[in-house]
Image: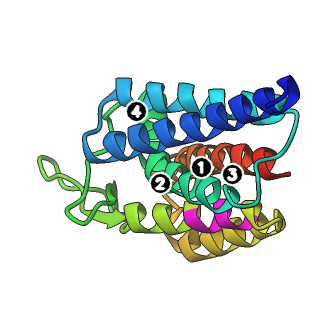
Amino acid sequence: MNVVAAISVAGWTVILGALAAAAVLSVLAFLRPRPMLLWAAAGTLGLAIVAASTAADPLPTVAAPLAGLLGLVVAVFGGSPSAATALRLAMGTSTPPGAHGGILVSVRSDEPAAPGIAPARREVLRGGLTIGILERLATAGAIIAGFPEGLAIVVAVKGVGRFTELEAPEARERFIIGTFASLIWATAAALAVHLAVR
């Protein structure tokens, strides 16, 4: 094996190894939310992006499906803890959680609240975990498949679907921060694959 081939094989090994490590750490961060697991997943994902962007040759065709699968796993499972971390850093724990995965917001009323009685609350942004998983799967899948325009479709569908729930300021803030963090994570995972198989 000549030196050039050895360098290519080493580069492919680093890319696939970093993607595999990022996938394992993303799944662990999803199952056992700990900031250290998320930061380790982010570090290995960053290593995969750097290795893929500096590789002399693209991954062999036989390894491309494995890279795509690992990228999807990183995107789907790592996005939830990254969105939760972004929300915690931006908003703290000031918004009470609802029983169905949403948040509780005060119901707007023209009548003044009676003294000593808490204002009525309703749960909005329900199903965020499931919607986030589907959003990241569609985002990463579209980018890996070479259809980055699909990202616009994902954002439009999510925005239209949640539009009626965004009248409360805390719901708007959570929606924007959570969506951006989730999409950035999924896009980074897809970028690693895209660069590796280019």
Q: Name the residue rendered at 33%, 55% in the picture.
A: 103
Which residue range is magenta in the image? 137-142
Q: Are marks 4 and 1 in contact (CB under 8 Å)?
A: no
Q: Nearer the viewer, mark 1 or mark 2?
A: 1
Q: Quadrant of the N terminus?
A: top right
Q: How far apart are the alpha carbons under marks 1 and 2?
A: 9 Å
What residue is pinned by disc 1?
A: 176
At x 19%, y 62%, the residue is 99
Image: 85 above or below 118 = above
Nearest the eye: 148 or 103: 148
Q: Residues within 10 Å of mark 4 (few under 14, many from 20)?
A: few
Q: Nearer the viewer, mark 4 or mark 2?
A: 4
- Is 62 displayed left or right of 39 in the figure? right
**Whole-percent x, y for residue 107 in the image:** 35, 63
Which is nearer the eye, 118 or 141? 141
Earlier in the chain: of badge 3 and badge 2, it is 2
In the picture of the structure, the residue carrying the numbered disc 3 is: 190
> Quick check: marks 4 and 3 in contact, CB under 8 Å?
no
Q: Main secondary structure of the magenta part?
A: helix
Picture quadrant of residue 130: bottom left
Q: Amino acid at mark 4?
A: Arg
Residue at x-position 45% and y-position 25% = 40
State if disc 1 and disc 3 touch (CB < 8 Å): no
Callout 1: helix, strand or loop? Answer: helix
**What mark, if any, has residue 171 been given in the picture?**
2
Q: Is residue 141 above or below residue 197?
A: below
**Does the image show residue 108?**
no
Coordinates of residue 108 in the picture (x, y in percent): 40, 63
Describe residue 121's horizontal placement relative to residue 177 as left or right.
Answer: left
Name the front one of labels 4 and 3: 3
Pointer 4: what residue? Answer: 88
